[in-house]
């Protein structure tokens, strides 16, 4: 299939003077020769061949060098000759468009895949409370991609059980665990790092960090050494998530000297190891986190990703790391167009979040999956975060079918307005107990006491002497329970479900509405990831042809597959 505009076999530096404002003449790129059976014609030929991403595609012009008639044809076989000095002989066809094979394993940065032992540059990001479940991690790993277990918010014994299972089921295959910034529970962060180091977890996704912490640096530099070739080796890797340049700068810099000296003083590392740590970044890989579900700054990806890539280049020049820094993209990626845009802008990898929560492997309830599958792009809101409630930090959640966002916002208003539970007007307290908590404040605080005596006793000790902190813990009880109720599918608490979700979920639903993925039971993390990567590859080939002046007509675009249930032919 030739381009829909008129073409000439002669080389041209621009549009034809007679082509009109809606037409252009593509430049002749070379010559094609082959058997007539290898030439495909017809209105659908271009659309049908461009989706076969493992084969080259030649858009052919007319026969011979002198003919001006446009012949509609494409070929995926035959002999192609390119170059400014190529002559088009009698019987040859002018090549006016060429798209090279673009396999899924060509997307992203090969150095990222090599560093983490992956086939494909797709990552299932961590979703707290085990929503990014062991099943999610196993499925992604078996498919040659990376899954991060959502350890945040879980008891250490549950995280330890997940480590044991994944170590056993995956062996040496790649997987990671979440390490979330816990400014209100620093002992928890220390405990998680102790657990990871003890069990040999070699990769963490560091999320929600506003500043670096000692446990994070301890994890990163533990076991650092110089090998026989003189290279600094760090057994533990960090993939950071950040939406602010100042935070990303800290991750791309060597560990802070004060932390290194503190680790030397505690005996966690030696002076020699501290010297080695000055030669490495805290994270070689950083995900530019745009408008995502959960913790987010609602940054637009089109502005954020180039900014982080520019920072990467600046930091690489400054420090000259032997292993180059890399930037991936996360937040808002839920369609092939979004994935293609991320790769086109230079993303080393893409991270999926919200869409994975609606997949069958996610550690949540069927009720939540159904709610997510019915959502549209505007069905989201910002609400106070349980883990950083007192700081006013917010998370992005689903608002359709739930009153969580409104109720959580009211709790934060009360926290700002009063210094203790007793200061809250009696009618307001009664409304909270009956409508929101469905329990008395005394019952809530008893649950809080039991929880923190096991997880972080210092929090309960502080609550005994600080009434405002005691009120905060009671409010955080509700915020924490709402995600648990959602994960369990508690039917009596549907209006309180806290479901982390970005607008990408609605974009995904719109994309798949006429395909097999419209049915929730067909959504698996691997199928979703492969379809997005495959779609990105097809769009990459379309853009290549478009840059050469070859444009698909509306009729040709109709044959493009929106989603595929079988993708084995496209896998590396």
Image: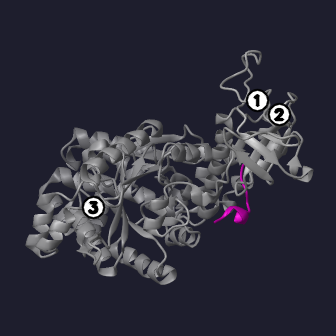
* Residue 282 drawn in magenta: no
Number of other residues with Cα within 10 Å of mark 1, as a class: few under 14, some 14 to 19, many 20 or more: some
Measured from the top left, where is residue 56 in percent x and y? 72, 52
The residue nearer to you, when weighing 381 against 118, is 118
| Number of marks drawn | 3
Q: Residue at x 46, y 52 (%)?
A: 498
Query: Do the residues bearing badges 3 and 2 touch, measured as CB atoms within 8 Å?
Result: no
Of tags 3 and 2, the one toward the viewer is: 2
Q: Give the extent of the magenta segment.
A: 560-572
Number of other residues with Cα within 10 Å of mark 3, as a class: few under 14, some 14 to 19, many 20 or more: some
Q: Residue at x 62, y 47 (%)?
A: 336
Which residue is denoted by mark 3 in the rendering? 445
Residue 160's label in the rendered image is none
Number of other residues with Cα within 10 Å of mark 2, as a class: few under 14, some 14 to 19, many 20 or more: some
Q: Is residue 317 left or right of residue 126?
A: left
Return the residue found at the far left.
265
Measured from the top left, where is residue 345 in percent x and y? 49, 42
Of tags 3 and 1, the one toward the viewer is: 1
Magenta portion: prevailing SS class? loop
Q: Is residue 414 visible?
A: yes
Q: Residue at x 63, y 66 (%)?
A: 572
Pick whichever of labels 3 and 1 is earlier in the sequence. 1
Quick one: SS at disc 3? helix
Pick whichever of labels 1 and 2 is earlier in the sequence. 1
Label 3 and label 1: CA atoms lie apart by 82 Å
Label 3 and label 2: CA atoms lie apart by 85 Å
Query: Do the residues bearing badges 1 and 2 touch, measured as CB atoms within 8 Å?
Result: yes
Pick whichever of labels 3 and 2 is earlier in the sequence. 2
Which residue is denoted by mark 2 in the rendering? 65
**Residue 182, picture quadrant:** bottom left
Which residue is denoted by mark 1 in the rendering? 10
Label 1 and label 2: CA atoms lie apart by 7 Å
């Amino acid at each position: 299939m030739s381009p829909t505009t008129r073409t000439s076999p002669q080389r041209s530096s621009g549009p034809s003077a007679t082509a009109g404002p809606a037409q252009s003449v593509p430049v002749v790129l070379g010559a094609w020769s082959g058997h007539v059976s290898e030439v495909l014609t017809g209105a659908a030929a271009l659309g049908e061949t461009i989706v076969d991403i493992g084969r080259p595609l030649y858009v052919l012009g007319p026969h011979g060098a002198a003919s001006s008639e446009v012949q509609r044809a494409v070929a995926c076989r035959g002999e192609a000759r390119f170059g400014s000095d190529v002559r088009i002989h009698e019987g040859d066809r002018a090549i006016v468009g060429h798209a090279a094979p673009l396999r899924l394993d060509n997307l992203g940065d090969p150095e990222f895949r090599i560093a983490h032992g992956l086939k494909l540059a797709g990552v299932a990001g961590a979703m707290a409370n085990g929503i990014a479940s062991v099943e999610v991690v196993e499925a992604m790993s078996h498919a040659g991609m990376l899954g991060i277990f959502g350890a945040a918010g879980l008891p250490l014994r549950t995280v330890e059980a997940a480590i044991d299972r994944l170590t056993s089921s995956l062996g040496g295959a790649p997987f990671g665990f979440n390490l979330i910034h816990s400014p209100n529970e620093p002992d928890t962060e220390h405990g998680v790092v102790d657990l990871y180091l003890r069990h040999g977890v070699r990769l963490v996704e560091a999320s929600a960090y506003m500043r670096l912490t000692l446990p994070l640096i301890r994890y990163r530099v533990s076991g650092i050494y110089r090998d026989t070739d003189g290279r600094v080796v760090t057994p533990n890797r960090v993939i950071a998530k950040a939406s602010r340049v100042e935070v990303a700068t800290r991750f791309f810099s060597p560990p802070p000297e004060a932390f290194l000296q503190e680790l030397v003083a505690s005996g966690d590392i030696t002076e020699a190891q501290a010297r080695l740590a000055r030669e490495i970044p805290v994270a070689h890989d950083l995900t530019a986190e745009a408008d995502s579900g959960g913790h987010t700054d609602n940054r637009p990806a089109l502005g954020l990703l180039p900014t982080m890539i520019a920072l990467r280049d600046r930091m690489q020049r400054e420090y000259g790391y032997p292993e180059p820094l890399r930037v991936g993209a996360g937040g808002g990626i839920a369609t092939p167009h979004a994935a293609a845009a991320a790769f086109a802008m230079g993303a080393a990898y893409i991270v999926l979040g919200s869409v994975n929560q609606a997949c069958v492997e996610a550690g949540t309830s069927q009720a939540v999956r159904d709610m997510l599958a019915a959502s549209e792009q505007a069905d989201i809101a910002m609400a106070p975060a349980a883990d950083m409630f007192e700081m006013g930090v917010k998370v992005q959640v689903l608002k359709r079918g739930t009153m969580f966002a409104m109720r959580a916002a009211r709790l934060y208003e009360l926290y700002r307005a009063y210094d203790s539970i007793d200061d809250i007007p009696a009618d307001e307290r009664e409304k909270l107990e009956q409508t929101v908590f469905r329990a008395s404040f005394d019952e809530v605080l008893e649950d809080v006491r039991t929880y923190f005596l096991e997880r972080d006793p210092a929090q309960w000790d502080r609550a005994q002497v600080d009434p405002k902190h005691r009120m905060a813990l009671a409010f955080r009880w509700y915020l924490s329970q709402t995600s648990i109720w959602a994960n369990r599918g508690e039917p009596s608490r549907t209006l309180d479900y806290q479901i982390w979700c970005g607008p990408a979920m609605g974009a995904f639903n719109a994309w798949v509405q006429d395909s097999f993925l419209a049915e929730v039971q067909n959504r698996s993390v691997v199928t979703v990831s492969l379809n997005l990567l495959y779609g990105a590859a097809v769009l990459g080939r379309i853009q290549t042809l478009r840059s050469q002046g070859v444009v698909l007509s509306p009729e040709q675009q109709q044959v493009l597959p929106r989603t595929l249930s079988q993708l084995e032919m496209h896998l590396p």
